[in-house]
Image (tube, grey):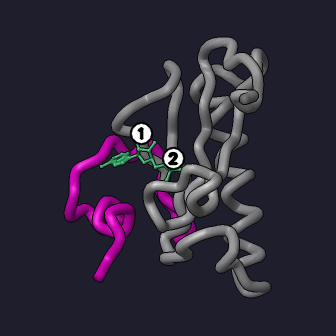
Amino acid sequence: MSTLFTKIIQGEIPADIVYQDDLVTAFRDINPAAPTHILIVPNKEIPTVNDLTEEDEQVAGHLFLVAKKLAEQEGVAENGYRLIVNCNKHGGQEVFHLHLHLIGGRSLGPMILRQ
Ligand code: AMP
């Protein structure tokens, strides 16, 4: 069965897609944590970072280059932003289709909630 993000990539579920090419698709997070919150997703279904293989090297690097481009487009590059990839339970991953969160547009505070 396709992941939620594959359905978005294939246009079966609506989303605010801001960028798409042969390797990745980027769309706005439905529950944004900041004024800019974009998810950058490989078109190929890779569940988590743990599932990356050497053949995914190009797409993994491409996620960062697209993030850089979108940060500029969103006007957050200069002030700065945060890129987050959650993995599995302790990482707080909810959707098991690898994605890079691009979050910015305000000061984001400390990197991790300390207990
Ligand atoms: P993660 O916890 O890293 O797996 O992040 C999953 C993200 O997907 C969350 O920030 C959700 O708000 C976001 N999300 C879930 N469903 C949708 C959707 N239909 N469209 C856009 N973003 C979504």
Number of the label disc, if any, that sits on residue 39? 2
Q: Is mark 1 within 8 Å of ligand 1?
A: yes
Residue 23 within the segment the image draws in magenta: yes
Q: Which residue is mark 1?
A: 29
Drawn side of residue 51 relative to residue 111, left or right: left
Q: Residues within 10 Å of mark 2 (few under 14, many from 20)?
A: many
Residue 60 within the segment the image draws in magenta: no
Is there CB contact under 8 Å for labels 2 and 1? yes
Question: Which residue lies at the image location 49% right of the left edge and 76% below the top edge?
Answer: 45
What x and y, as percent, mark residue 99?
56, 57
Q: Which residues are magenta?
A: 1-25
Spatial CA distance of label 2 from label 1 is 6 Å
Going by the numbered disc 2, the residue's amino acid type is: Leu
What x and y, as percent, mark residue 92?
56, 50
Q: Where does the C terminus fall, quadrant-wise?
A: top right
Question: Which residue lies at the image location 34% right of the left edge and 38% below the top edge?
Answer: 30
- Look at the numbered disc 1 and give the secondary structure of its residue: loop
Drawn side of residue 81 relative to residue 96, left or right: right
Q: Where does the N terminus fall, quadrant-wise?
A: bottom left
Drawn side of residue 115 relative to residue 87, left or right: right
